[in-house]
Amino acid sequence: MADENDNERMDDNQKSDKMFTLKKWNAVAMWSWDVECDTCAICRVQVMDACLRCQAESKKDSYGKQDCVVVWGECNHSFHYCCMSLWVKQNNRCPLCQQEWSIQRMGK
Amino acid sequence: MLKEKGQLKFEDKWTYMRPIVLKLLKQEPVSPAEWQELFYDVHLVCLWDEKGPVKLRDHLHEDIVQFIKQAQNRVLAQRQEEALLKAYIAEWRKFFTQCNYLPTPFRQLESSLQGKTTSASSSMQSNNNSKKGPIDESIVRKLMLDSWNDSIFSDIKHRLQESAMKLVHAERNGEAFDSQLVIGVRESYVNLCSNTEDRLQIYRENFEAAYIQSTEMFYRMKAPEQLATNGVQAYMRYADAKLREEEARAQRYLEAGSNGVIQCCVKVLVGNPLSVLLAECAPLIKAGETERLQLMFRLLERVPEGVQPMLRELENHITQAGLADMVAAADIITQDSEKYVERLLELFRKFSKLVHDAFSDDPRFLTARDKAFKAVVNDTTVFRLELGTGRNIGGKMVAPESKCPELLANYCDMLLRRTPLSKRLTSEEIESRLRDVLLVLKYVSNKDVFMRYHKAHLTRRLILDASADSEKEEDMVEWLREVGMPADYVNKLARMFQDIKVSEDLNAQFRTSTARHDAINIKILNAGAWARGSERVTVSLPVELEDYIPEVEEFYKKKHNGRKLQWYHHMSNGTITFATTSGKFDLDVTTFQMAVLFAWNQRPHDKITYENLRLATELPDGELRRTLWSLVAFPKLKRQLLLFNPPATAPKDFDEHTTFWVNQDFALIKNARPQRRGKVNLVGRLQLSTERSQIEDNQSIVQLRILRTQEAIIKILKMRKKISNAALQSELVDILKNMFLPSKKMIKEQLEWLIEHKYMRRDDDDINTFIYMA
């Protein structure tokens, strides 16, 4: 399979007489949550890391932090979903701006 | 009948009783009738004559004393030592046997005598007692033993002891004699004692004391003589042998449970010439004379403070020998991590073997060894790691540290990456070497530096897919956890593995989503686990690559919500085909190298200036110089990919007018002949960070240490509320030891900072005590 591909490209190369041709590119990118403030105001941990609670439980087997996602409110403030779902049980307002909390979107 | 008995007087009966008593004492035969008679008469006397019991006792006493006097005369008649002892032992044995018989008929006497001094009820009790231990409690027996002690023993004990000790002395000098004689005397001392609370009292005060004294005298003479004539080493053997001999002798001649004589021997044989013996220690360690050291350890262990100096000698020797070895091999080991680690391990093995062979892995010596290993590993004379590169952080100088953790991490990388080394070794060998790394790491005080380098190497291996064995990689993470590396660090490593797997799944999905993309692999990684600061480098990608970007981003957006992507082109890499007029080569290159090389695609034969390349690639100056240098002077190539003019010896020598062109005669040289086809890897060591971020990296280590120190201080204070400076320091080192060894200076600075910021204060009465302020 790989050989076939290689041969194809070899043919391509001969047609285009460019000196350098791309054969394979291993591109690296980093993703992070698209947030304004990179610390969760509730647990004081970076939103890229799992929240304190999840870290303590150290969910090792289930792809680590994928479970601990970020949530954005209508006010555009963001927190760990775990932290916020506990928070709203006490007080249905955004901890940062005191607006009524409603979820704008969830991280995935 | 009764009346007749009523007139019964002690004096009447004694005339009948006395001959029987005397026969008993002399161990002459007594008929059963006489024996019975004696019982009956004692009974009668005690029952009918009010003063009978006392009189009976006094007369009995008199007879016993009389008998003992005769025995004494018989013993003292002997002039010669051995005969004297023999006679004494014989007399004593006879007498002692009678001590068990004679009291029996007089039991009635005993209860009457006791009844006189105590009330009726307690006499009942004492009857019970006497049933329980008739011999132990017997008054007559005590009377007999005390009489023996008072008369014969007090008079001749000195002669007895003297004679016994003369025999022991003779034995020490190698003459044979009947050891039963000494043993017999000792037994008489022990049995003689009627003090029920301390049966060994007489024995200890007389026999043992004399024994110890004569022993001490003997060796006080002999020991210096031996030392002077035969030298220290022979003397150690002599002392060791003599101590064993004396232990065996003491077992024969002394009661068990008393250690006095051995202590005395140790003092004379080892304690007195201690300094002479110790002077021998260092040369023995140096020469690795395990047997002699063993001997010395055995001897010195017996005296207090004897082992301490040995421990010091060992520690000094290992430290000095270790450092000397490192300095001697400095040229090789500073360049080659493998050689360094192997050299270090060889040292460790050598000294561990010494400790094992000479000191049977005694914990005290193991500790001394560990201390010395620490000193060697953390020493900064051979190579040092300057953490405070560039500016000093916050005006503070950072002390140089050993480069050992960096070299360890490099060695680790060589084992885990696909390298000639890892290919040469079997899986088991690699595992055992990784374990060795962990062993050395145990002694490293700046473990955080190891962690940083280890993580960087792991990042490279995962991104370049260069691991030799992915199972071993994950094992290593667990081993690091086992040896106590901080959990947050180990978890981060584990997350990188998980993340790579997630990314592989994503890549597979991406590649099936459209057929066009078989030339691209994507790794989209969690910035939290991988990235370190904002160290991205901008580059203007060749169109061939640029085209892919929006598609990948589009694909990713469909998969995920609320995420933003940042391209890490300094980490990406790939393979390109390079076609010259004469040949065709596959080149593994970094994306930066690609960006530079693709600039010639439109004008293959042009010479391009540095400045124009900078405009084409938009790479920062430092990165462009570095990338160009890797293409004009790649160490493994005989014919380089690019040629340039004017000549330069380092990347910094390029100026904006330096021109570069593609070497059309490029070829791989194999067996001195140019090859027309082939594959070459130009990636080298994948760059993870820019020069600027390297400095930041070093600073971040220092910064992290400061934070960790503050954190730990607060943690301790929160728990203790109030703590002395010394206690705080030791707890602090304990908490931080798996990351780094906090310097006194840094602790002091952080304490001041915390005090200034009102996290804590000094006690008003004692400035060396700290109090937590919530």
Image (cartoon, rainbow, N blue to C red):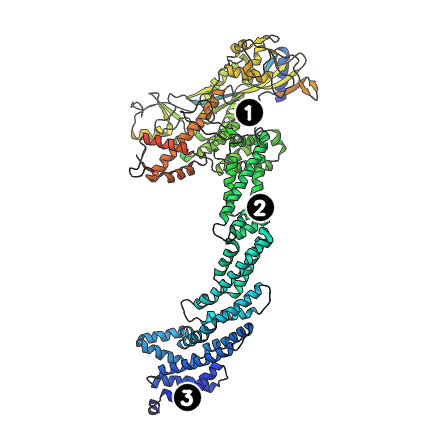
Give B41 or A30, whichever is nearer the viewer: B41
The disc, 3 or 2, on the residue closer to the chain's N-terminal end is 3
The residue to which callout 1 is attached is B464
Label drawn at residue B15: 3
Q: Is residue B600 left or right of residue B103?
A: right
Camera-nearest label, 2 or 1: 2
* Disc 3, SS: helix
Decide: is B230 above or below B250.
above
Q: Which quadrant would the N terminus of chain B be assigned to in this image?
A: bottom left
Residue B370 x/y as whole percent: 51, 41
Q: Is residue B120 left or right of residue B561?
A: left
Amino acid on which the number 3 mark rests in the picture: Thr
The answer, for residue A1, to whether it is visible in the render is no
> Gap in Å between the C-alphas at discs 3 and 2?
81 Å
Amino acid on which the number 1 mark rests in the picture: Leu
Give B57 or B595, whichever is nearer the viewer: B57
* Identity of the residue drawn at 55% across and 70% down: B180
Amino acid on which the number 2 mark rests in the picture: Leu
The residue to which callout 2 is attached is B284
